[in-house]
Image: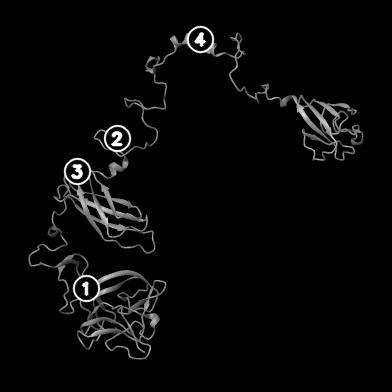
Amino acid sequence: MADYKNYSATSLTGGGADALDRTELDGALLNEGDIAITFELTTGKTYVHRLNATSGVAESYPDVIAPDANPGTKRWVKLSSFDDYSKYVHIDGSTPFTSTVSGVTPTLSPHLSTKGYVDTAISTLSGSIILDHGGLTGLGDDDHLQYILVNGTRAFTATISGVYPTAYAHLATKGYVDNATATLSGSIEGNEAVVSGSTSITVSISNATNADYILTYGLKNIVDLEPAQYGMVTTSTTISGFTVAFSDPIDSDNYILSWRATDAGGSGGGGASAFTDLTDAPSSYMGETGKYVRVNATEDGLEFATVATSSGANIIYGPTPTAPEQYSLNYEGETKEFYVEDEYADVGDVLYMTTDGYLSRSNATDTTKMPVRAMSIVYNYENQYVLLKGQVACNYWTWGTVGGAIYAAANNGQLTQTPPASSGNVVQIVGYALSATAMYFNPEMSMIVIA
């Protein structure tokens, strides 16, 4: 039988006089199967270790302890500790009960209670427990100062948010009041934010006398660098609001619909009930069939004007240009705002579109500067409105053949009635002459390059 030895210690590590790894327990003196019992004073735990002479694993408290002297491959390997017994409940609560536990009826306050004791206590007290709020005393006492009173004698101490009222007795929000008047006998106005992607917007108004009010509105956007332009049309009007539809989905959240609704009867507002009642407008519609309204030449009123026809050079925007005004140009037609990057672009110059989407003067000698897309109608490069199609009159034009085609010329931005003929030149018809000083501008997108 092997001669096993038993050792004792009061700590596992640290090399102290009573430690399991103390130098007195030299590895050279220890043998396979020796037993060590450690009563660890610092934790109150008891460990049992057995020597494994060939283990050689790294020390790992408290499972593996290596002798400080001549350990070699010898290791104290933990067999058990009293806290390893899972059948016990720890006094520190770290190991809970795994099933119900029976006890005795408690007699002192610190005693654990049984279910029977608790059930009896509740049954005894139930007669004095108030289960309905109305049974409480002191309900009429004003001891909750954070609440307002139903009689209105305690005011709010800050602004209070609410919801949009829908019934007559509902309290009103500021937004409701701002959008409403007692009656729509005069006019009301407002601003509504338009959400990006919207194809329409519905505006709420209140207390309109009828749905025949007159609407005026417009879109404004002072944030975006180049805001888009949208057509708008009223699609419905009711006594509670109106709906405006847009020609295309709105492309950003920076658009505001500014609107005004005016009673068609004009009662109470002191304004005109018809267009001809306005002080700065024509006083009668008689003899004005087929005409349209424009701002007059002195820019202080409105007037009727005749729509231009193809039978002549009748330019309906402004007076007909006369010499010797060097840059007189009048037009009527389809316009759009673009960025013109050519600082030398003058009124009447024709423009092509660059690869970055800007406009610059065209030139029939260079295919990269063609085709013509628009005409400059103001002397101001960078952001400006250009003519895409329409009638134009310019006092320095001298067209020789009325009705004859007009081409982009072999000079920057210029026009000619003689088609370019040199090799590499681009031939593009951009319109035709209406008179010696007027033309109909409508660029064809087909071109011919001279071989």
**Category of crowding for the residue at label 1, using alpha-carbon neighbours closer than 10 angstroms: few (below 14), some (14–19), many (at least 20):** some
Amino acid type of the residue tagged 1 in the rendering? Gly
**Category of crowding for the residue at label 4, using alpha-carbon neighbours closer than 10 angstroms: few (below 14), some (14–19), many (at least 20):** few
Task: Pick whichever of labels 2 and 3 is earlier in the sequence.
Answer: 2
Amino acid type of the residue tagged 2 in the rendering? Leu
SS for tag 2?
loop
Against 342, residue 71 (above or below) is: above
Q: Position of residue 260 (x, y in %)?
A: 24, 52
At a point 28% along the width and 34% down the height, the residue shown is 170
In this rendering, the label closer to the viewer, 2 or 1? 2
Q: Provide the residue designation for mark 1.
A: 318
Task: Pick whichever of labels 4 and 2 is earlier in the sequence.
Answer: 4
At a point 15% along the width and 54% down the height, the residue shown is 272
Q: Position of residue 349 (x, y in %)?
A: 32, 80
Q: Provide the residue designation for mark 4.
A: 120
Q: Give the quarter of the figure containing the C terminus.
A: bottom left
Q: Provide the residue designation for mark 3.
A: 183
In this rendering, the label closer to the viewer, 2 or 3? 2
Q: Closer to the camera, 103 or 326?
A: 103
Q: Closer to the camera, 2 or 435?
A: 2
Against 4, residue 195 (above or below) is: below
Q: Position of residue 94 (x, y in %)?
A: 65, 26
Q: CA distance from mark 2 to mark 1?
A: 55 Å
SS for tag 3?
loop
Q: Position of residue 436 (x, y in %)?
A: 21, 85
Instruction: From the viewer's perspective, tell me whether residue 7 is left or right of residue 86.
Output: right
Q: CA distance from mark 2 to mark 3?
A: 19 Å
Amino acid type of the residue tagged 4 in the rendering? Thr
